[in-house]
Image: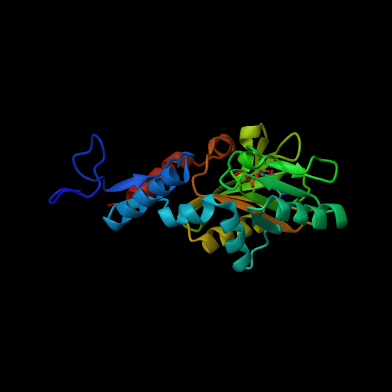
Amino acid sequence: MSSGKSPIQIPYFNALPKAVFVRGIAGGTLQQITTRLNILHMLKALGVFVYNDGKAIERTVDKAMTSFLLHQAGIATPRSWVCESRNLAHKVIADEVVQLQNKLVIKPLFGSQGQGVRMIDAQQPPLPKDTFVDGVFYLQQFIDSPHDYRVFVLNNQVVAAMRRTGEGWLHNVAQGAQCESINDADVLAIALEAAAALDIGYCGVDVIRDKEGKLWVLEVNSIPAWRGLQAISQVNIAQTLVDDFLSKIE
Ligand SMILES: Nc1ncnc2c1ncn2[C@@H]1O[C@H](COP(=O)(O)OP(=O)(O)O)[C@@H](O)[C@H]1O
Ligand SMILES: [Mg+2]
């Protein structure tokens, strides 16, 4: 950080870029992830346009934070618990699963593409090893449905939406789900509400409908993939995003 030079030096760049398009925050140690996110914050502070904004990524990368913010905004999202204590997690399971006969899912807090998402029910062995969930137990009430929905939102408008149907209860495209285009007004509406609550430029909102027809927001993705959605959508999603990105730095 010598005088006269930009405080951030990027290899192969003579000057700071006008904008950065965040395509992933790779997993790593606490130090690595903190550094990666803070570099986004520093770039923004230096006047670089960051897409999605680092704060918006922080709000959504952590599933428990997303659950909290959705809940605070009054948007239906399944009841969720987060704790570091295995004993407390067992207590939630004893109360919810054993006594109330609810089903729960456990998810890696920073997970994606359905990896590590597991069902907890009375017959299952209690909980995965601490290392499997990086020491944080994030549990969520299970909503039984033969499919779920993914809605791609940009600037508070829906770009494309689909129903995803997996072989089991896990409906991620990366897990082999089939995709069909949808236009259900209530699904699009709750996804728009979720995106607005998280104050995010663009995102992929996961929504599920329970047996009574009620919709729930499962999670919001700030760095969504769109391979499955593109396969069933007329809109060129990558082009739409690039156009929006460029329009913001002109
Ligand atoms: N609470 C839940 N009830 C029912 N199904 C769920 C629940 N949470 C997740 N799922 C299923 O698992 C998939 C992956 O979970 P999600 O929370 O979206 O995490 P990921 O970041 O791995 O996509 C969802 O698309 C859905 O099919
Ligand atoms: Mg998801």
Task: Give x and y (percent) for residue 67.
Answer: 62, 58
Residue 235 relative to residue 170: left or right: left
Quadrant in which residue 169 is drawn = top right
Among all residues in the image, which is located at the extreme left? 4
Residue 38 at x, y percent in the picture:
37, 51
Seen in the image, is 192 located left or right of residue 175?
left
The foreground one among 155 and 131 is 131
Q: Position of residue 15 (x, y in %)?
A: 20, 44
Q: How many marks?
A: 0
82 versus 119 height, above or below: below
The quarter of the picture where residue 11 lies is top left
Between 218 and 211, the one lying in front of the other is 218
Residue 17 sits above or below residue 184 on the image = above
Toward the top, the furthest residue is 176
Q: Nearer the viewer, residue 26 or 145?
A: 26
Q: From this viewpoint, is residue 158 visible?
A: no
Question: At 58% across and 41% down in the image, what residue appears?
Answer: 112
Q: Is residue 167 above or below residue 240?
A: above
Colouring mode (rainbow / by chain / secondary structure / one colour): rainbow
Q: Position of residue 200 (x, y in %)?
A: 47, 57
Query: On the rendered structure, is 68 left or right of 35?
Result: right
Q: Residue at x 60, y 68 (%)?
A: 72
Q: Is residue 54 visible?
A: yes
Tell which quarter ligand 1 is in: top right
